[in-house]
Image (tube, grey):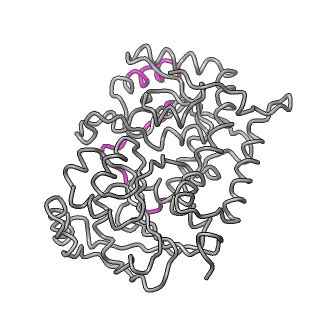
Amino acid sequence: MGDATTGTDRNICIVSQRKNRHKFANCSIYEFEDVIQSLETADVFTPRLKSLEHWQHRTRRFLSQRTGLFEKFPSGASSPKVDKHYDIFGCFLQMPVELMSVDAIGDWRSRCDMAFCVVEEVWHRTIDQYEPLIKSLSKFDLIVCCFAETCERLAEVTGKPVIHVPYGVDALRFLPDRGEFDRPIDIHYMGRRRPELHDALLAHARDTGRFYHYDTFTSLPVTTDHNAHRDHLANLVRRSKLFMVDYAKKGHADQKTGEMMGWGPRHIEGMMGGAVQVGYTPDTADYLENFDWPTVVSRLPEDADEAVKVISDLLSDPAKLTEMRLQNYAHVGRRHDWLQRWRQITEFFGLPDTPAMAEREAKIDATTARLTRRASDQVVSIGSIGGAKR
């Protein structure tokens, strides 16, 4: 076996929750796992809990809020055991509580040279509530978090390096690789929403005949196939003119966020599919660092009627929408594909790119160049675009 720190002949062990969690919100991280599999030689372990309500899982979860002894109590999950050497071990979680089932794969730590854990969503209140569980992340060499604001606290509790790796999107799935589609959907409002704005948009759609696409379910939806869901979402976005964005958890009365202002995958998904983003974004340092060009979003007033007026004006100006779309294409594929997120992790461990990483980057660059080429045969230049308005 080659030296993983100097060559690209390396074996990756991925632990996925795809057999336990089937909500739409989980599909993004499964997409990240799939992209890594396309870039590396990887084995995927998928521990399966008997159920989220089984007494063993509930007891382990109860103990994880109170004592480190929770690790001695089995989760009841089943899985093949890790039985060979791996250069890198990667555990992927949407929320820390999903760590419960990883005990099922056995003594992975002694068989893996380097280990990291991706935890997408960590709120300060979660750290307080599950401190023994959070401390158990210290067995990893690196902790990766999508929320910049909690990285410092995670490092304090675990004593391990924590890096901020933002959400990403599979650019090769979402970018219109065969050229632009017709965009019959005028406004796409996915998932959580502001009730007053939703009502105003419903009235606007009735009055104007515009196509307003929104979700109608009343509980968190689930899917039996994360790839089918991601393909469906990409196809909807690529046929939408406008895509609504907002702060994380906006529109629900849960109390996880406290004073934190997070942002989620939808802030990339819309742009990657070519829909112009409208809505509300945090003025946090990490958001402004990742989205530092002026066309990234058209911010809406808080008043619902005024917001609909802005949306209506945008829809009445197709030339402006095209310009914003072109500018966004020039940035988003080259900066927000899962490739860039995986590279942040491999660079931490001093690992070089694999040939598959270079090949993926070339495909994204070629698609971006085609999409940003104007009728005059000039290409939108990233270097010519100024910083974001704050």
Q: Note whether 265 is above or below 374 in the view shown.
A: below
Please give the name of the residue rendered at 39% of the width and 83% of the height, measured from the top-left corner. Answer: 81
Q: Residue farthest to the right?
A: 376
| 224 part of magenta stretch | yes
Q: Tell which of 57 and 90 is nearer to you.
A: 90
Q: Is residue 211 left or right of residue 131?
A: right
Q: Note whether 15 is above or below 366 in the view shown.
A: below
Q: Is residue 347 left or right of residue 145?
A: right
Q: What residue range appears in magenta?
A: 200-226
Q: Note whether 286 is above or below 54 in the view shown.
A: above
Residue 92 locus on image (x, y percent): 42, 62
Q: Tell which of 117 and 77 is nearer to you.
A: 117
| 325 part of magenta stretch | no
Please give the name of the residue rendered at 31% of the width and 62% of the height, measured from the top-left corner. Answer: 98
Please give the name of the residue rendered at 38% of the width and 76% of the height, measured from the top-left corner. Answer: 109
Q: Tell which of 77 and 12 is nearer to you.
A: 12
